[in-house]
Image (cartoon, rainbow, N blue to C red):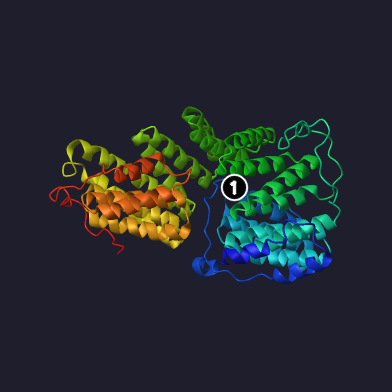
Amino acid sequence: MRRLPEVQSELRGVDGDPPTQRSFDSVTDRCTPRSGSLADVLGEGVVRGPRSSAAPPSLNSTPPEARGHALRERGNLLLRRNDYAGAARDYDEALAMFRATGDALGQAQVLMDRGALRLREGVPVQAVRDYDEALALFQAAGDRAAEGDALRARGFARAEEGDLGGAVCDYDLAIHLFLQLGDREPLKPRAGSRGAAGDADAPGPSEPPRARPHGAAHGRALKARGDLRVRLRNLAGAARDYSTALALFQDTGDRSGQASVLKARGDMRFGQDNVTGAARDYDWALTLYQATEDHLGQAGALKARGDLRVRQGDLAGAEKDYDHGLELFTATRDVLGQAAVLKARGDLRSVQEDLVDAVRDYDRALALFRTGFERRGQAATLKVRGDLRRKQFELVAELVGVAAADASDLEEALSDYEQALALFEVLEDGAGQAGVLRARGDLARIQGDLAGALSLYLGAKRLLDVSGNAAELSATLAEIARTHALAGRAAEARAAAEQALARADRATSAEYRELAEAVLAGRVVARDEAFAKRDSRAPNGLKRFD
């Protein structure tokens, strides 16, 4: 994976004027594909999605000259049904037929479809290879519009592979190519639109589309680059790309494209704590998804709006959005969509202290993430399910004492944490690892093992020092301060509490600010030696990070 400074150096020319032909050629030289490391991890085997029970349409009556196109269409149908194995067979056979007849454009179109399949299967390295071959065929055929779309698709695959600099190159080339093809007219709010009446973000009413030869494809490339810029924290650049893409989709009358941009911009604004702007974007996106009967897009927007409503404290509204989104994801057989909503609804029910239903949602989400081979989702769900089980143990321990609490909750929480930690380590997710270590530190502290707790908290701190998550680092420092205080180390406790408050930002929980302040005020006192002994019923083998 390329280092962020290398990627940022390639972004320097992105925000300026359209590049000259000379700069376009120099960028082309830098965009030679590189081999990625995911091939070593995934090997030759590919991840298959759940199969549909419906039989694929027969091609027995299809004439030989039309069989390649019919196979491609059936492959696309099977892909929509999540029958990845069937789609792969049809694409391979169609590709062989087009090669036998010398149909270069037919080959390129199938390679584009198969690249999309590879992405769904979780093997972006193979997708990049398909897009490379398709791009060369489109270039040889002189189909520059298709070349631009292939560059956009390859850019997305490269980003998934971790080659962010390569993705930037591909998106820039695609956007410049569409500009060369005639999409140069400056975009302005149309007269009479809501965007012209004081709200520059608002999509206007439907009007006859203006002539713009490749507006939709150009818009898709801009939207994709905007997504990448969000990932690279270039939010100003992302906002410009989204605004331009939205205008292009409006001009071409592409409501699906408008909805996709509004949903993405809503996500960006939500991340910036612009709750009002995010809510407006999600509402507009939902209206467009409903108008186009895009149930999958609607489900994703409902899940996002549900997350936003949780932030606003509208838990009843959030639950309605989650329930509706889950219905749509289930109807469209989107396994990972269902899993994401169930995990979010479990989080909501945990906040509402509906612990039984929360665990039930987490159990279902975990099973679906495993079905879809989604390791990050599995890790996140295991972590929060462990937190919930830890909470159950803590509640009982506060009432009857650690020795009398149900050890099964403790065992299950530790099991969830161990599995989550292993997955986060494979994913090289330092922040995820730190969250698990801090949770395990909390358990060790509750059990009276202050030395074990401190070791785990320090391990979390080392990971967070690298990741730069100020809120999580502040919370971890507050726990370190408490542990020192409970152990009678007043000077160390004070130093850690001061660091916790110094590192706190607006995302830091009030609970941890208050904890650090309590340590500084001397309200966290040392336990007597007998109480600090570890519960003899607790499992052995907590990992140490000395």
Q: Is residue 296 above or below residue 370?
A: above
Examine the rendering and report whether any part of residue 192 can be seen.
yes
Residue 239 percent coordinates (x, y): 68, 46
Q: Nearer the viewer, residue 448 or 262?
A: 448
**Residue 44 % position (x, y):** 53, 68
| Residue 172: % across, % down | 73, 59
Q: Residue at x 66, y 32 (%)?
A: 287
Q: Quadrant of residue 365?
A: top left
Residue drawn where x is 45% and y is 37% of the image: 345
Residue type, mark 1 in image: Arg
**Occupied quadrant, residue 116:** bottom right
Q: Is residue 185 left or right of residue 536?
A: right
Nearer-the-camera pick, 170 or 453: 453
Give the residue pinned by disc 1: 81
Q: Secondary structure at mark 1?
A: loop
Instruction: Determine whether, in the image, residue 427 is placed left or right of residue 11.
Output: left
Q: Which residue, as the protein is rendered here, is positioned at the far top?
A: 316
Splitting the image into 4 quarters, where does residue 152 fall?
A: bottom right
Q: In front here: 276 or 245? A: 276
